[in-house]
Image: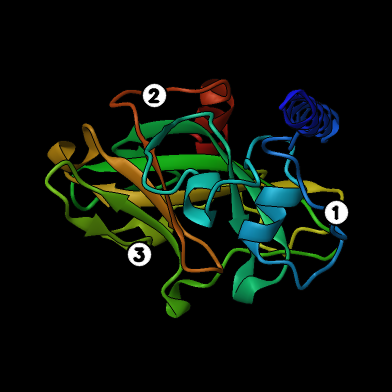
Amino acid sequence: MAGLLLTALTASGSREEKAETKPAAVKGSKKKVDCTDENLTQAEWMQSCSDEGGDASAGPEEAAGAGKDMTLGESAQTGGDEGTGVLHITPDTVVFTKKSTGATAKNGLFAVVVMKDKAMTAVAADEPAPVSGGGWQWRTPDGETIGFDSGNSSTVAFDKYDGADPVQPGSWQWRSQVFDLTPAQAKGGTLVYVDGDDQAHAWKMPATDSGPNVADVKAKLDF
């Protein structure tokens, strides 16, 4: 009987020792991948390469913050046009005006948004063309979506913030979008961007001029 008890205690102690020496799983550890691989999807890049979040244990939508409205100044990692590369996009400043450089808003108010686009992989990346169903939209408080070519928005042009070329690796450029809105549509609106992976990113927009470059944007708009 004593021998059986000793054997049981010895086996139990051995199991406990093995449990204590077993390496603990590291929650959220990122698997090793080549972050310069142009074939990486946005979800893979977010999970394994991003310094801004993206727990490897989270699903692609959770890692990318899908479905959560951001605010002006917050950034999103987005898939480039046709899934090539990754763009880090940050809406920086919004300005509202009735007129600009000889153009007058047809619906009452231009909403001018400028943003920074930064390439995050070893290949050039671009925003998808609107004809593909991607790019920028303005969502009104009642849910209507206003396109980039609303009213007289296409007549507004200004330098410095009008970048349109693919963003080269290791660099960034200013871009801008203009929407021709009614005052009601402009107040409490949401900026929406559909990237090259067909994922939507949204930013809740202030109802008044906001952002660090308001004065400079107004000067470039010449009003």
* Left or right: where 45 falls relative to 135: right
Mark carried by residue 32: 1
* Left or right: where 40 falls relative to 109: right
Above or below — where is 96 with respect to 6? below
Pinpoint residue 105: horizontal percent, then vertical percent.
27, 48
Q: Which residue is mark 2?
A: 209
Kind of residue at disc 3:
Asp
Q: Which residue is mark 3?
A: 149
Pinpoint residue 85: horizontal percent, then vertical percent.
73, 64
Kind of residue at disc 2:
Asp
Residue at image coords 48%, 53%: 61
Secondary structure beneath disc 2? loop
Secondary structure beneath disc 1? loop
Mark 2 or mark 3: name the one nearer the start of the chain: 3
Viewport quadrant of the N terminus: top right
In the figure, residue 210 lies in which quadrant? top left
Measure the C-alpha gap from mark 2 to mark 3: 21 Å
Viewport quadrant of the C terminus: top left
